[in-house]
Image (spheres, grey):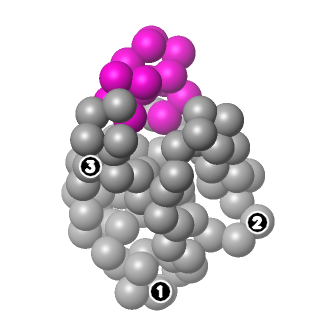
Amino acid sequence: MAKVEIYTTAFCPYCSRAKLLLGRKGIGFTEYDAPHGSQERKDAIRRSGGRTTVPQIFINDEAIGGCDDLFALDRSGKLDPILQAG
């Protein structure tokens, strides 16, 4: 199973949607609370190549983007194979 990490903030609807999709698929993930100015947010920006929005999602240490990117991968049928790779 893939290693999934997600950087989020409280009350973020996109973060909630991304976590809901992963949960529906039965995928466990590590969540990092990353409010503005926090070290976690700086880590997410660095790891994602400069993207400043949340959520930032990483699968097997590869940045896949945010909520819209996650849903696009799912719609295209590419998410499940990525999640199955470990």
- For the image shown, how many numbered marks are present on the structure? 3
Q: Distance between the residues labelled 3 and 1?
A: 25 Å
> In this picture, which residue range is highlighted in magenta?
70-83
Can residue 21 be seen here? The reply is: no
Q: In the picture, residue 81 is in which quadrant?
A: top left
Can you give x and y, in whole percent of width and height, for residue 45 in the image?
33, 67
Can you give x and y, in whole percent of width and height, for residue 22 in the image?
58, 41
| Mark with earlier residue (2, 3) | 2
Q: In this view, does 40 lie above or below 47?
A: below
* Residue type marked 1: Gly
Residue that mark 1 sits on: 37
Q: Distance between the residues labelled 2 and 1?
A: 17 Å
* Residue type marked 3: Asn
Q: Does the magenta stretch include residue 73?
A: yes
Identify the residue at horizontal 43%, vertical 76% (top origin): 41
Can you give x and y, in whole percent of width and height, for residue 83 in the image?
38, 34
| Mark with earlier residue (3, 1) | 1
| Mark with earlier residue (2, 1) | 2
Residue that mark 2 sits on: 11
